[in-house]
Amino acid sequence: MRMGPFERKIGLGAGARRKNRTRIEIAASMLEIAKQGVRKTQLMYMGNLSFELLQKYLESLMKADLIELQQEGNQNVYRTTQKGLQFLRDYQDLQKHAAALASKKSMLEKFLSK
């Protein structure tokens, strides 16, 4: 397994498997990448998406008004909308709550293991 910077950062080595990302995780990743404006190819590579998945998610995110296509000079640039930025804030809030719940669950499991 070839490791990229993300895998090295979180400590995945050879033989380790990363779980598949959820729809929400993929959407949040794309919106985070597009905050500063990116071309389609950059979004595909930085988001680690196949062309087919990129197309599917771009269509969905644009339909939901979370990301928009802008013309900058002679380039098409995808940029996160205000609604998309709110999605990211809500997603980050959800992540914090999920981490807190996981911590409490771990604490409860310790009580049962005594």
Image (cartoon, rainbow, N blue to C red):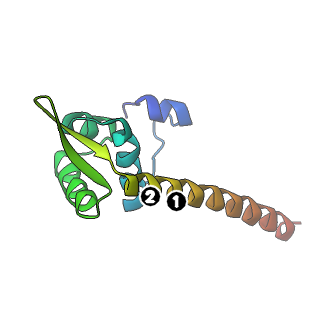
Q: Residue at x 38, y 41 (%)?
A: 35
Q: Residue at x 86, y 68 (%)?
A: 111
Mark 1 is on which residue type? Asp
Q: Let me know if residue 59 appears in the view.
A: yes
Q: Residue furthest bottom?
A: 112
Determine whether, in the image, residue 25 is placed left or right of residue 90: left
Q: In which quadrant will I find the C terminus?
A: bottom right
**Of 105 and 38, the residue lying toward us:** 38
Spatial distance from mark 2 to mark 1, Cα to Cα? Answer: 5 Å
Determine whether, in the image, residue 91 is placed left or right of residue 97: left
Q: Position of residue 74 (x, y in %)?
A: 10, 29
Q: Quadrant of residue 95?
A: bottom right
Q: Residue at x 25, y 33 (%)?
A: 42
Task: Identify the secondary structure beneath mark 1.
Answer: helix
Determine whether, in the image, residue 93 is placed left or right of residue 105: left
Determine whether, in the image, residue 75 is placed left or right of residue 16: left
Looking at the image, do the residues carrying marks 2 and 1 touch, with CB atoms under 8 Å apart? yes
Mark 2 is on which residue type? Phe
Task: Identify the secondary structure beneath mark 2.
Answer: helix
Question: What residue does disc 2 label?
Answer: 87
Question: Which numbered circle lies on residue 40?
Answer: none
Question: Which numbered circle lies on residue 90?
Answer: 1
**Of 91 and 51, the residue lying toward us:** 91
